[in-house]
Amino acid sequence: MNIKSRLALVFAAIVAGTLMLMSGFIYFFSEKNLYEGFYERLEQNAQILGFAKLNSNRYSDSLYYEVKAEYLQKLPEEHDYIMRIVKGATSLRFSHPLPLSDDFFKEAILSGKAIRFVNGTAYVALYFKDKNHKEDLLVVSHANTGAITEELSTLKETLFWGLLIFVLLTFSVSIWFADYSLRPIKQTIREMDRIHSSNLNLRLKSDGKKHELSRLNDTFNNLLDRLEVTFNLQQSFISNASHSFRTPLTIIIGEAELAMADLKEGNHAKVGASLEVIHRKSMELKEIISGLLGLIRSSGHGETELWEVVRADEIVEHVRDAARQISRGINVKIDLQIHTGDERALQVFGHKNLLILAVFNIVANACKYSDNKPVVIGLEAGAESVAITVSDEGIGIPEPDLEKIFSPFFRASNAREYEGAGIGLPLTLNILRLHNARIQVDSELTKGTLVRIVLPNILAGSKPATR
């Protein structure tokens, strides 16, 4: 069952339930009022008859009939009985034609009034004390309630057919209303069906208002924005990765074929040179694969059980020592500045090894492209964050390439002669995103590059990023 039918059924069921409660309310109180009015009419009849009999000396006996004919409506099968009761008696001492028990008369004598309903007939008895006689007066009026039953039956039938007609009408209106309400959603679905991987640039229409459908369209458009970026990055990644794999593999295969040919000819010197090229390119391929695996792993949250409180100065010192080992002869130094007296300003919550890897990638690039010029690692601790800066006096990055340096396998146009796979910076960016960190790169061609990493410290409540 589709949503439109369900909405119509639910709405019709709510209206039907409400109408049924209202119909029951109307029937219950109509029945109550009809019977109360009927009993009240019988009581009035008995009161007039009793009054007339008690005052028969002062008024004519015909007065009762005149008043009754003038002011009271004739009830169906109406009859009256007048009985004389010995003063002080609590029961009748004679037989009567009425299908009533002695309890009815006893109740009327003791309390002054009694009401019964037997086999479609209503009975009202009133007890009058007569000061002028030795016996009191008991008046019983009764009438058939068939008219009330018929009236209630007509009311019940009217309510039933009215309820049925209104429910059917409500269901019809509900279908139209549900279709009208779901029309924008249908339009959204039609627009969504037009969007495929070949036209991810299309977006849903949004009126800019803050109702639910507009917010849904805006949310879906934001999702499309992220998908488009991810899809483009994936296409670029696949293209660059295939190129990065193809180049060393082609060289390895070519050198292997040359080595086999030289081996057949007995030229062992050339074989050794080919093997050396194969070994170098194999290591380069291994580095690319390791970088890709690191890039994939850094896209998630990593092993969160290894997250701990880490001192930023220890990370910087570790990176400095590692950089000096791989780039002997280069001058790597640390410039430490602390702007607060709280030692916790230097502490961050994170994955120590990943943070070391992220900073090391920046420092390794600075060393590689500096041509033995000094590299300075700066550390600044503030009230809410700690900043790590890496500055060099190297070749710099061309301005058009700055916005692309964090794309996988991208290499700046002036870095072709240096070895590298273009994976280090994307890996660094993923690690920093996990730590809610920011990275900024400023560079001037032939004069050097400054990279600034800002990490929230534990004073600011640093924690892993959520996705």
Image (cartoon, grey):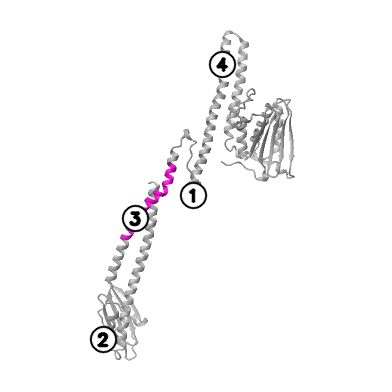
Q: In this view, does 279 lie above or below 216?
A: above
Question: Crowding at label 3, few (<14), some or many (≥20) Cα neighbours within 10 Å?
Answer: few
Residue segment shown in magenta: 161-189
Q: In this view, does 315 lie above or below 459?
A: above
Q: How many labels does the image show?
A: 4
Foreground: disc 2 or disc 4: 2
Quarter-wise, where is residue 251 in the image?
top right
The residue under label 2 is 62
Residue at left offset 25%, top offset 76%? 77
Residue at left offset 57%, top offset 13%? 258
Quarter-wise, where is residue 360 in the image?
top right
Q: Where is residue 365 in the image (x, y as percent from the top left)?
A: 66, 29
Give the position of the C terminus as an image quadrant.
top right
Q: Nearer the viewer, residue 369 or 276?
A: 369
Residue at left offset 44%, top offset 43%? 188
Q: Are marks 1 and 2 in contact (CB under 8 Å)?
A: no
Q: What residue type is labelled 2?
A: Ser
Q: Position of residue 202 (x, y in %)?
A: 48, 37
The residue under label 3 is 169
The residue under label 4 is 254
N-terminal-most mark, 4 or 1: 1
Residue 211's label in the rendered image is: 1
Disc 1/disc 3 C-alpha distance (Å): 29 Å
N-terminal-most mark, 1 or 3: 3
Disc 1, SS: loop
Disc 4/disc 3 C-alpha distance (Å): 83 Å
